[in-house]
Amino acid sequence: MALTGIEIFKLLPKTNCGQCGVPTCLAFAMSLAAGKAELSKCPIVSEEAKAKLTEASAPPILPVTIGVGEKAVKIGGETVMFRHEKRFENAPAIALLIDDQMPDAEVDARLNRFKTLEYERVGLKLRGNMLALRSGSNDAAKFVSFINKVKSSTDSPFILISRSADVLTAGVKACAERKPLIFAATKDTVDQIGALAKETGCPVGAKAANPEEMAALTEKLAAMGIKNIVMDAGARTVKQAFQDQVIIRSAALNKKYRPLGYPTIVQPREMTTDPMKEALIAAMFIAKYAGIIVLSDFRGESLFPLLVARLNIYTDPQRPLATTQGIYEINNPNENSPFMITSNFSLTYFIVSGEIENSKVPSWLYVKDTEGLSVMTSWAAGKFSADILGPAIKKSGIENKIKHRKLIIPGYIAAESGALEEELPGWQIQVGPRDASNLPAYLKNWKA
Ligand code: SF4
């Protein structure tokens, strides 16, 4: 059960020393209770209090990491039922299934799709995250050789799937250093799989027939000292699986019921044989509330919309998506190419850069950091005015890339053109169109 701010306050040193960044222990306790601060910010809290507070300040759905290195996947850590209450923390991982009974050519084709189906959107790389390696053969030696083949070709995280605890044990030992998710411990295999997870430090999947059985299983794993648990609550009809996701999230968050306070794994591929229906079911679980979604295969036409849906739902509603400040080259510009400026609101950047790309006119685009605000909003907020843009352009390095000194500004900030010429002596400020859709025609007539 999470502690209140006052209960946390009672465990703090009460010196009001301010080393945590807030002036009083009470203020820090309130921030901790609201999940807005980390206990590590208080350097003088006692070990005993630390142990109690660490447990109490853990999110109601524990975070779980699968894999190692840059591609490790972090799921769980969620604190709200609905995105608008705060934000969803860790986007669900999307996994591609490969079976050790598939012919080599099919395994290679799937690995290739896993690596190459990658998309860029609003400056972010979108792609699937994990490989679900299943032992359809139920043959430990075959599974190990299959894992070794896949392991040599990717450093992405694995889920190892088998009904046999012995096959799973052999598989985990072949790649334990990669910290795969062991899938799954059931009521019949929990002792062996739990011991394997403890020995190797790998996260473990728990599979039960329903949420009630799941709670008993996770309590058993927790009693073994295992906290890195991912739950498969068993349902294989869309309606029941959806209800279980909501029940689990609600029990963990609203009832603070720790036995269901772990991320979940869902298997849309076991709910339909139709690839398009599978994608629709997966989309539903992106919204509510999967930690991992295992797909029967990756197809560009269904993977891309799923990745975009995931991006949209897992962005922080309190922070606009922003593009990195800098000079962007579009259509291979040279020293005589036009030079434009825009804000770093991702949507603005993508609309403007898309129109420039469509124009086929080689161009330079300077994206100014406006904290993710659009041109109009940032200008109204004083973040896109001449006194800010002038110095930024001088520092940008554009003067080493172009011969001319002409800057095209968005039509919406035409009023800044005079002040900008004062900020940038020797430059000519040109007012571009207000609407990005008019950029291609404008650029085609532009002359250095
Ligand atoms: S650092 Fe610790 S003791 Fe100091 S004010 Fe913050 S919570 Fe209190």
Image (tube, helix red, strand yellow):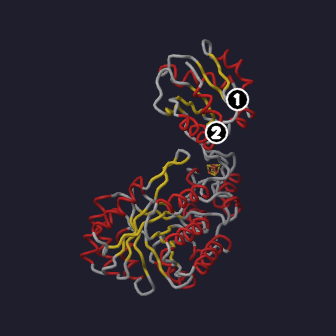
Q: How many marks?
A: 2
Task: Looking at the image, tell me whether mark 1 or mark 2 is earlier in sequence order.
Answer: 2
Q: Looking at this rendering, what residue extends furthest in the bottom direction?
A: 188
* Mark 2 residue type: Glu
The quarter in which the N terminus is drawn is bottom right
129 in relation to 97, above or below: above
Residue at 37%, 78% in the rendered image: 162
Q: Nearer the viewer, residue 283 or 218?
A: 283
The local crowd at label 2, few if under 14, some if 14 to 19, many if 20 or more residues have their Cα within 10 Å, is some
Residue at 38%, 64% in the rendered image: 179
Q: Does residue 12 appear left or right of residue 67 in this picture?
A: right
Quadrant in the picture for residue 160? bottom left
Could you tell me which secondary element the residue under label 1 belongs to? Answer: helix
226 in relation to 112, above or below: below
| Residue 369 in the image, given as x and y percentages of width and height | 61, 35
Q: Of the numbered discs in the image, which one, if any, rests on residue 196?
A: none
| Residue 36 in the image, given as x and y percentages of width and height | 65, 54
Residue at 33%, 76% in the rendered image: 135
Q: Of the numbered discs in the image, which one, if any, rests on residue 371?
A: 2
Q: Which residue is mark 1?
A: 411
| Residue 262 in the image, given as x and y percentages of width and height | 54, 71
